[in-house]
Amino acid sequence: MILNIAKRELRSMFLSPLAWTVLAVTQLILCWIFFSQLDVFFSIQKELTSLPNAPGVTDLVTAPLLEIASVMLLMISPLLTMRLISEERRNGTLTLLLSSPISIREIVLGKFLGITLFYLILIAMISLMPLSLMMGTELDLGKLASGLLGLLLLLCAFAAAGLFLSSLTANPGVAAISTFGLLLLLWILERSGDAGSTGSIFTYLSLTHHITPLLRGIVNTTDLAYFALFIITFLLLTIRQMDAERLQG
């Protein structure tokens, strides 16, 4: 049943122009950034050959591309997650869904899987740009895999947070603004971590503190655990919120 709900969500996304617009605009902007970074790399390539342990094309082209992609997707993700539950509530179909013989867990996980499948398509399209470099140069596939894994975990975190905030309102616009505000707060939270125990807590809670190493090819179990806990926490909050709504209805 989870897979059926996920397929339904993915199909409904591609029936609207929003998904196609997101894919097109994202690819267009990232392609321009990719070629710009590639041009910079070629312009300094001669200087790099004389440096010991000089950064390669993966460090100077792929890593910046994925870092910019993460910022772009921070702004785009709320537009994709805002309708997951709030639109069902606004259209009156959420009552039918909650009264059906489907568990709340299956509903939430199905919607989460649906948006995750869309993100996988988006990441696959983004990965074609750095992979194209293999036709003319050597690419550090380990760093690329780490960066793509980090991007996927980040998008799953965005999806989980957006799904929860979408379950709190019947207005998709409110859900989008709330999701963007929360994600932006978590994105810049590290800047508040100046010193002391409070600062270290802010630093740990910051999304950038955990995504930056992954995008640069450093896989740390602490970062993986952070994203796992982040995703699980917001999914459990969504399940609890919808379960309470089912009991009240």
Image: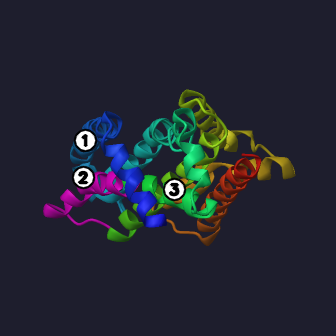
Disc assigned to residue 129: 2
In this picture, residue 73 sits left or right of residue 168 = left
Calculate the distance from the C-alpha at mark 1 to the C-alpha at mark 3: 28 Å
Q: Which residue is depicted at the point 39% across and 47% down?
A: 64
Can residue 16 be seen in the rendering of this structure? yes
**Where is residue 191 drawn, in percent x and y?**
69, 39
Q: Amino acid at mark 1?
A: Cys
- Tag 2, which secondary structure? helix
Residue 192 location in percent, x, y?
A: 74, 39
The amino acid type of the residue labelled 2 equals Met
| Residue 204 vertical position relative to residue 219 in the rendered view, above or below | above
Residue 162 falls in image quadrant: top right
Q: Which residue is mark 1?
A: 31
Label pair 1/3, CB-CB below 8 angstroms: no
From the viewer's side, name the closer residue of 202 and 27: 27
Which structural element holds mark 3?
Answer: helix
N-term-proximal mark, 1 vs 3: 1
